[in-house]
Image: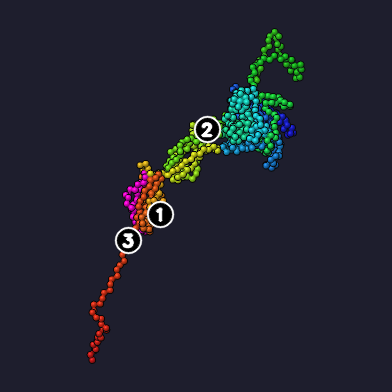
Amino acid sequence: MAAQLGRRLRKGATSGAVVAAAVAALAASQAPEMIPPPTDNAGGDRAIGTGDATTPPSDGSATGDSPYFTELPPLNTPNKPGAPTHLPVITGPAEAGIPASVLAAYKRAEASVRSTDPGCNLPWQLLAGIGKVESGQARGGGVDANGTTLSPILGPALNGVGFANISDTDGGAYDGDKIHDRAVGPMQFIPSTWATWGQDANGDGKKDPNNIYDAAQAAGLYLCANDRNLALKADLDRAVLSYNRSTEYLNTVLSWFEYYKRGTHQVPDGTGVLPVDRSDNRGRGNRPASTPPYSPLPTTPAPTTSAPKPVTPDPKPSETGVPPKTPPATTDPGKTPTTPPTKPTVPPTKPTVPPTTNPTVPPAARVARLTTVATGALTATTGNAFGKAPTVAALDASGAPVTGVSIKFEIVGSTDARFAGARTTATVTTGSSGLAASPALQAGQKVGPFTVRATVVNRTLAAEFTATVTARQADTLTRLDGDAALAATTGTGFTQQLRVKATDKGALAPGVLVTGAVVTSKTATDASTEGPYFKGEAGATARTKVFTTDADGLITLAPGDLLAGDKAGTFFLKLTAPGGGSTFVELTVAAPEPTPEPSTPEPTPSTSDAPTDSPEATSSPSPSA
């Protein structure tokens, strides 16, 4: 029974009721979570809005509501419940096979759009569903190595007969028709829509609607317009209806979308299954008769007068004894019978569908080129602000400026330069002229070049600037304490204060890096290895040191900042600055004065003229008896 139903459906049944029944069958057998599409368009393949008093705008849909293939997927799913989720590359139902280049284009488009608009949640299977319905996957994958169709895929002339009425917009460049537009390529874009949404996805320098890579990416961006989130059923329906405003089209695309979500496999280019039934050529064989996809809305008929109906009396007598009904009065043949007018026929109510909104192209998607604006050399001296800011222009394919594009500026390289607020990145939006300038750029103390890169947010388009930080300069260094030499003895420090003023072109030069070096002569090129030295941290010895001039352009050595060392002699302190300023300060180191030794006194001779050999004996008195 299911197989018979499937055959009937694939024979091109067009009524909304049958489509709804088919989708319901698919939902029951292979996609329990799928919400059956609405069945409001019971009259068949009629575009939403047909019968309105005004012609729909030419940009109301991507395809101009051109015809499409109506075959539905088979009821047997490519991945039956309980089967492995990863099917072999070349097995499965033929209808589930997608030509290699076409499948690659859909997946590449999904990845590209997700990188620029992740909130859209574009699935590649939706592109596959549209590609199946629009062109049978580029006529079964009939594309060359670059993804371009081997022959043009063109819809019928949109001349208002059964379709929208769209006069030529491209001079026949894409569709070969200089009178009316036609849908073009595997995704069936009309030229006016392609002019806005066309992409160069394969990088060959051309936006070609006949190229599956270009067309698939353009279709993805188109479906994601107006901040749609395709994970939401309402946004998904609006997106598909924006492509072709027909509820049967919506139902058919969603059926293939759900089918491909259950599993697909890759087949060689040119071997895909070709669909047969199309919405504008039914009636062949046992298919339904041809009906225009835009059937006119019924009009209210004028009241009509019908001829009187002859009345025959009831021949049967009353079964309850009640006298028979009185026959109605006969009509006088001489008078014209009058009959109340019949009730006018009320036309069926038009189905309510979600309103379609002309898609808005995101500004970032419209940018074809990001170019630098000549602002002169980006240079600054250490600690100062750059005089100009890196500036870029966002331009579309025609060279016109694009407003509202977010541009990210980033400092790249080994530098301590920063944007205002000590930041290394900043995002700026282009103005009405398409220009964006970075915040003020401040140089640090590190000299040398670095890069400022500008990038379109969520795109790879970029432009780069080279900026350079140079040291502040002074062309003159002048000593303010006279020309006398600084003097010290070995092992001590110089007790005199030293002050030097830096100027550049006669003006004070603050923030200049002045290098001081102790040398043995005014012609020496290298610092001395002995003699005076600068007092360093933890007792380290250094005979070179860099000073920074203060706000008044001065450097100052306080007493004790310069030590004499332990080598006596004459040395020089050589001071040099970027810009050519230099001066020498003489340093004299003397040995300390020797300390006099104390003298030893001569011995004093004896006062007696002749020495005595022995002392005289002295008798002590004896006691009396």
Q: Going from the N terminus, do you reach mark 1 or mark 2 first?
A: 2
Q: Please say whether residue 477 is one of the residues in the magenta stretch.
A: yes
Question: Is residue 430 at least partly visible in the picture?
Answer: no
**Residue 315 screen position, x and y as percent:** 76, 16
Identified by mark 3, the residue type is Glu
Say if 576 sits above or below 192 in the image. Answer: below
Q: In terms of image quadrants, where is residue 88?
A: top right
Residue at the (69%, 31%) spot, across then down: 275
Q: Please say whether residue 344 is one of the residues in the magenta stretch.
A: no
Q: Nearer the viewer, mark 3 or mark 1?
A: 1
For disc 2, the marked residue is 395
Residue at the (45%, 43%) spot, across then down: 469
Furthest residue toward bottom: 625
Identified by mark 2, the residue type is Leu
For disc 3, the marked residue is 593
Position of 575 compared to 356: left or right? left
Q: Dot 1, how many residues are within 10 Å of its Cα: few (below 14), some (14-19), or many (20+)?
A: some
Disc 1 to disc 2, how far (Cα)? 61 Å
Q: Nearer the viewer, residue 515 or 310?
A: 515
Q: How is the image coloured?
A: rainbow
Identified by mark 1, the residue type is Ser
Say if 140 sits above or below 413 in the image. Answer: above
For disc 1, the marked residue is 528
Say if 75 sits above or below 536 in the image. Answer: above
Residue at the (50%, 36%) spot, across then down: 372
Q: In terms of image quadrants, where is residue 236?
A: top right
**Residue 507 screen position, x and y as percent:** 36, 42
Q: Report the span colored magenta.
A: 476-503
